[in-house]
Image: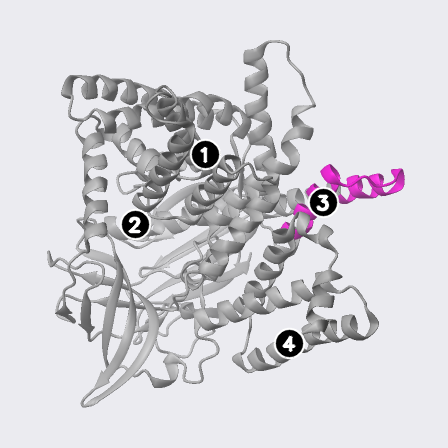
Amino acid sequence: MPWIMNFVQNIDFRFFKRPFLVMAIALFCGILLGFDLPDNQLFYPIIISLVSLSVTCLILFYIRKVKLFLPFTFIVFLLVGFLLICFRSGLAEKDRFEKIYSTDKVLIVELTAVDQNDREWKKMTGVIRSLKDGLSNRSVSEPVVMYVQTEGFILSKGDVIAVASEVEKIRNAGNPGEFNTHYFWRSKGVEYMSFVGAEQFKLLKHVEQGFVADKLDRISNYLKSSLTENLKGDELAIALALILGDKSLLDVEVKNSFTNTGAMHVLAVSGLHVGIIMQILMFFLGRFPKVISRKSAVIIVVVIMWIYAILTGLSASVLRAVFMFSILVLSQLTERNYDAINTLFFTGFALCIWDPFTLFDIGFQLSFLAMLGIFLFYKPIEKWIYFENKWLLKIWQGTAIGFAAQLMTTPLSLYYFHQFPNYFVLTNIGLMASSGIILGAGIFIFAFKWLRPLAKLTGVVLTFSIFLSLAFIRWVESLPGGVAYGFELSLYAVLLMAIAILLLFLAKPSKLWKYVLYYSSMLLICSSVYSRYTNMRLNELCILNLKQPAFIIKNGADILCFYDAKREGFEKVKFAVDSYQKLYPGDVKYFSLDKNWQLNNSTMNVQIENRNDSKLISINGNNYTLILRNSYNSNVPTKTTLIAMPWVKVDVDYSLTNGAFRTLI
């Protein structure tokens, strides 16, 4: 059609310098719009509006010759993102799962992933393919996460099972600072969960692994056995996590040490690992130029890295890194122009087209922003200091990369984790060399596992390197003021901080606007610090939503936790208190509710009366009663707030089914 040719010929081709910058941002916005859509009744009005806007752009161009290609492109990919997430989440379906499900139906589930561990209850994900009720069989397609009591029964990916347990929507417990389970699973397209006992499922169909899956399993087992035969203890756990992405052996203390020092990215296989491994492989293959040409070496390395990505679980951050590095090296081979930012956004665009839920993966978000920070800020930061000594210069360049990555990821890290590692620069410098040594030694063990003496010797080197790294991490953690807890940012604050960082480094405003930017940035920082100070000085009663009675009385810097639990239950109480402490910092003291308590100081008078059916709490004359049973002793203070445990079905002022009970004191 002539008008289409005319349209194409009049496009402002300067747009194509970085086309995926606009296309990816539009796609991301569309995915966010669909993900946060409050009501599926808005589905069709939004589609009609976006289609109308795009058609208007075309008509204006055709009649008025207005160049609207950029807004047209933005609207089109906004629509694409919106439709992708809506159809993947089932929002557009007329018959939603909850409308046709009832507890008497049997679920036919096809398993999509099965945790490989020795625990009695295994986590599995699957897709509910149909609902059976007598002779009727209703086809559906609803993702579900299940915790199955297998009792030694082996299930694997692809198996089809019949499940007779109840399915419920995934909900958060509502305790302060807790992991957002609902958001985590919803960001993977899963909204339902089920606990399946050993008598509540039956295997209908077992699927044998295909040739490719079987070979990948063999490779994975070979790599894991290479490490388990030559390392042990914390060193083995860290090696498995750092090299293969397997965190199953890591204990809580090691994880906390890495998190508190800003080194958790080292344990999560990501772009750092991909880059180091690619450099090691290229260096090794480059030693044989007469046997392997550079082009062949690059292709071999790319193939190996994709296999590595599959073996480490195809996490979003690894996918982003391998995909991007593949484009980089292939563009160099074909001698095409390479724009780092355009490639980064193309990578994000491609991954979100394939799976729109990738956008909500925390690993992908932090990895993407870290790379964006490096591309945008590394050069300006590197110019701050210049060293004549080449080794000092290399250390500074590595530090500048860490600064650049931290700049873009800090707002999001504060939002998700409520803490900031004050010595992250020191940590990055310390782990700069050891990460390469550890990964290199790991690759060497994989290559020479068959040569036992050499593998053992390499295992000693690897063990010593990890031991030194862990000792360094723990030393940094022990430094005073190593971690700043208590940050509580809204998404709007995260967005404003990111915009302020971008403008400060990239914009070239007038002198007046520079002052506006500087003062606005300082205002944002002061606001975050003041919010943290408020959280630290908070005085409140918080009754936790757990399977056993537990509550917190926070009095400024003191956190008093009262609990009624055995050893297994106490671990869950402690986990909930640790999460609370990250958001509302303080010194924790634990008090068992096996007796009554009376605590007094200059600012607070606490009395706890421990009953079998309730707990009476008095704080500065204010009374609260935590009810444990439906038939409780109603002999409580006349002026008291009644709070019920989740399983209690009586009329009260507040039920913990709605989340933790909190009130200022």
Residue marked by disc 1: 272
Q: Secondary structure at mark 2?
A: helix
Residue marked by disc 2: 570
Residue appearing at x 35%, y 60% in the figure: 546
Image depth: mark 1 or mark 2 in front: 1
Residue appearing at x 72%, y 72% in the figure: 3
**Residue 272 lies in the magenta stretch:** no
Q: Secondary structure at mark 1?
A: helix
Query: Which amino acid, mark 3?
Result: Ala
Q: Is residue 408 left or right of residue 441?
A: right
Query: Which amino acid, mark 4?
Result: Val
Instruction: State the mark number for residue 51.
Output: 4
Question: Does label 3 or label 4 sit earlier along the sequence?
Answer: 4
Q: Are marks 4 and 1 in contact (CB under 8 Å)?
A: no
Residue appearing at x 28%, y 34% in the figure: 237
Question: Does label 1 or label 3 sit earlier along the sequence?
Answer: 1
Q: CA distance from mark 1 to mark 3?
A: 26 Å
Give the class, few, some or many, for how many residues have Cα within 10 Å of label 2's Cα (few <14, many ≥20): some
Residue marked by disc 3: 500
Give the class, few, some or many, for how many residues have Cα within 10 Å of label 4's Cα (few <14, many ≥20): some
Q: CA distance from mark 4 to mark 1?
A: 41 Å
